[in-house]
Image: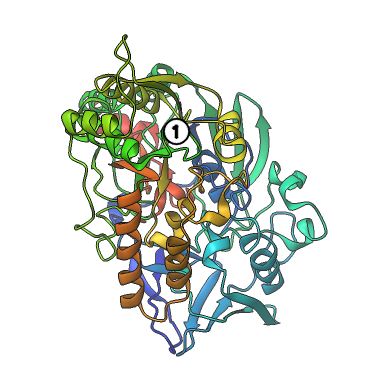
Amino acid sequence: MRHRLIVSMIPGLLLTALPLLAAGQTAAQTPKSGGTLVAIVQPEPVTLTGAVNTAQPTSLIATNVYDGLLSYDNDLKPHGQLAESWEVSRDGLAITFHLRRGVKWHDGKPFTSADVKWSVENVWKTIHPRNKAILVNLTQVDAPDANTAIFRFTKPSLALLSTLNSWGAPVLPKHLYEGTDVLNNPNNNKPVGTGPFVFKEWSRGNYITLERNPNYWEKGKPYLDKIIFKVVPDAGARAATLENGDAQYAVFSPVPPKEAQRLADSGKVKVETNGYQWSSPVLYLDYNLGNKYLKDVRVRRAIAHAANLEGLNKVVWYGYGKPSVSIVPTTLSQFFDNTVPRYPYDTRKAEALLDEAGFPRGADGVRFTISNDYLPYGDDYRRTAEYLKQSLKRVGIDVNIRSQDTAAFTKRVYGDRDFDTAITWNASFPDPQIGLTRMYWSGWVGKNIPWTNSSGYNNPEVDRVIEQAQGAATQAERIALFKKFQQITQTELPTLPLIELHFFTVHSPRLKGITQDGDQSQGSLKNAWLEPVNANLAKAGQ
């Protein structure tokens, strides 16, 4: 049986890899090679390279084509991918990665430290919406030989080692990107990686096909011959496709939660919530602080009091989540601050705040009208918008719900900022610096970078706290700073946290090996394999 590698990190010490039996893998579950997996991707990605677009649909494809330096187990401990081992200097100002030898890009060129150095300095540090902030203190990457990359910092960057997987920090091939416009490089839509699957075809509006990489560095993997990612826009059609076996895999709550329970009860599919630990997603409402009503903090607090989060979680999300207390979710327990200001459901308090702000009800009972743009990733987001519309109507706020495709949504919200309120979600990741501070740092405003600061929030004190946390020498110092960050942002409410989402995966009982890592939903399917149909029928007594 095959083993995976778990690597621990202690500053100043060289890391060695220790074998650990893959979770749940027994002699009775020996992986079978071969077969085609049909998966669902929704909505269709706008590009296939996660280094230039961190949207979830892109990640589903890209993480099968590209590798990162690390991956993460169910306890979110890092283990080696393109890096076999690594060490942190005692002062925290250097991290040395010892790279895997003999790895090749899909076009046959050798992978080397030059690819890592180029990716860090020209993509991660410059245009990647998460890593640009994480790497603010990185000065350079040294590549003393083909198999060593040394990251050098002016201040420690403790969050970095939590985001180096194939979604958080994919390594791009220098020989195909150097000297080009990275954002418009044709390889973004015809990706060439080092990962377990090779890009074959993208039939727009229909499917994306990947094939097994016969030269993958992890011998014997992947097990699957091919993956076909089908674009299935309609939620009902996705449920039917999974139920009748025409597709065997779909992630990020591909069907409405009420359908998930029915499908699980049918026994025709399995519903799993494992594999999302690394992302820790939070659903939130962004306010455009340029709006004449929403620029008043009393209005923002009134909306918070009018939003019944318990009801939202039960009615729309069917309990696949929990009401948020702070933008930092409870899953990030060491950073979460339970003492932040809270806004319990209270329509009388909401009405009083709106009156105090100078927005009385008119003759028709309406105080003012605002728009809402929801993330076009499925019915759950539309229903969230409808639920909030009804909630705000009770306190005299009329909401005009607008829908559009993903490209139009991201341009409207993060580029043009032509919106009043927007519903979307961000992955928190294991550290707030990775997924959350980008929503509040003023340097991201108007940059047309999805899932950054769309509200227009500009607080110099919060900027300083974020920047101090980026270079803090100890975790204790960072924890204190992030608690201060939460106190300020939950007082000023440029963004209203709604639900800590519990995403789920729907898959065929025949599909094995998909819940082994904490970043599985954002990772590759190299461990996945399909139980032969005949064996499955025999179990059922057919």
Say above or below: 252 vs 442. above
Residue that appears at 69% across and 51% down: 192
**Given the image, on which type of amino acid does mark 1 rest?**
Ala
Residue 434 in the image: x percent, y percent?
45, 60
Total count of labels: 1
Is residue 283 visible in the rendered image? The answer is yes
Quadrant where the N terminus lies?
bottom left
In the displayed structure image, the side of residue 204 where residue 308 appears, left or right: left
Is residue 502 visible in the rendered image? The answer is no
Between 139 and 536, the residue placed more toward the observer is 139
Between 108 and 475, the residue placed more toward the observer is 475
Residue indicated by mark 1: 422
In the displayed structure image, the side of residue 382 where residue 139 appears, left or right: right
Residue 414 in the image: x percent, y percent?
57, 40
In the displayed structure image, the side of residue 46 where residue 518 appears, left or right: left
* Element under disc 1: strand
Say above or below: 11 vs 179. below
Quadrant where the C terminus lies?
top left
Please, which residue is most extreme toward the top here?
A: 364
> Crowding near pointer 1: few (<14 within 10 Å), some, many (20+)?
many
Determine the image quadrant of residue 512: top left
Question: Which of the colour schemes (rainbow, by chain, secondary structure, one colour) is used?
Answer: rainbow
Say above or below: 205 vs 210. above
